[in-house]
Image: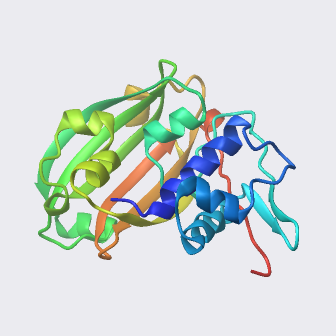
């Protein structure tokens, strides 16, 4: 179950992206938005704070909150957000599909525990997926999920959305994701399942995700074809 402020953030973000609140205009006042979303001012301020940190708006003292977002010219996987693959595809206006190539329960070896951050002996779900946009296989995900936190997970669910299952069915609150971004050479496993054209390098995102109990339940490496990948970050100074 996600916090209310994050649902408000997503709705405001989508309205900004879709042009309901255009670039260089002020969004409705805090009082008006509190009425629209039937929430407290504190909840709304949390949502606005996330919008600001992700580069969608900028507060102007005595004036309101200004939209500073402009759409990018390529598919934009925003690393500042914790969003599902389906949400990212929808935000970019792309037809998306996930194919599951590996789904198995394994025990974390010492080497795998050191690689992922899980404890040796943990029961893990090893999941490998290919993410497709407009019929092109552009992302290869290799994931390990803590099995005890995701009971009932199946390949069919994984083809839809693991996060949606965790939040909407199991009632989990996903709170924090720690990521590193690197560049790596294309390997045979990439060529076997991805549409790589003549690319020899991939953008690689290593991701560890935690729930509201502080439990790391996911370790994923995502390997992206570079022409559909964009690192996006917003730095805020003085707040």
Please tell me how many numbered marks the rendered image carries: 0
List x then y, in percent, for residue 70: 79, 43
Q: How was the colour assigned to the protein in this rendering?
A: rainbow
**Residue 32 falls left or right of residue 161:** right
List x then y, in percent, for residue 13: 63, 49
Residue at the far top: name it. 135
Residue in the picture at 44% in, 37% down: 86
**Residue 59 falls left or right of residue 190:** right
Q: Nearer the viewer, residue 131 or 202?
A: 131
List x then y, in percent, for residue 223: 48, 43
Residue in the picture at 34% in, 63% down: 173
Residue 225 at least partly seen = no
Q: Nearer the viewer, residue 209 or 1?
A: 1
Residue 228 at least partly seen = yes
Q: Nearer the viewer, residue 24 or 114?
A: 24
* Above-or-below relation of 233 to 19: below
**Residue 207 falls left or right of residue 69:** left
Residue in the picture at 48% in, 40% down: 87
Residue at the far bottom: name it. 238
Quadrant of the rendering where the C terminus is positioned: bottom right
List x then y, in percent, for residue 104: 14, 44
């Amino acid at each position: 179950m996600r916090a209310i402020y994050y649902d408000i953030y997503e709705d405001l973000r989508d309205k900004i992206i879709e042009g309901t609140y255009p670039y260089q205009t002020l969004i409705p006042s805090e009082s008006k938005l509190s009425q629209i979303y039937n929430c407290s001012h504190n909840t709304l301020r949390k949502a606005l704070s996330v919008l600001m940190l992700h580069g969608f708006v900028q507060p102007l003292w005595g004036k309101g909150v200004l939209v500073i977002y402009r759409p990018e010219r390529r598919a934009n996987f925003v690393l500042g957000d914790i969003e599902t693959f389906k949400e990212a595809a929808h935000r970019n206006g792309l037809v998306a599909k996930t194919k599951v190539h590996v789904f198995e329960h394994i025990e974390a070896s010492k080497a795998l525990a050191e690689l992922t951050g899980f404890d040796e002996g943990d029961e893990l779900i090893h999941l490998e997926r290919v993410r497709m946009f407009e019929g092109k296989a552009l992302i290869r995900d290799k994931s390990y999920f803590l099995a005890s936190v995701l009971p009932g997970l199946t390949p069919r669910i994984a083809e839809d959305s693991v996060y949606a299952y965790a939040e909407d069915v199991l009632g989990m609150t996903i709170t924090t994701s720690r990521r590193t971004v690197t560049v790596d050479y294309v390997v045979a496993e990439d060529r076997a399942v991805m549409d790589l054209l003549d690319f020899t390098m991939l953008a690689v995102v290593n991701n560890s995700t935690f729930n509201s109990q502080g439990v790391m339940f996911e370790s994923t490496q995502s390997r992206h074809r570079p022409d559909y990948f964009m690192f996006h970050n917003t730095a805020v100074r003085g707040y």
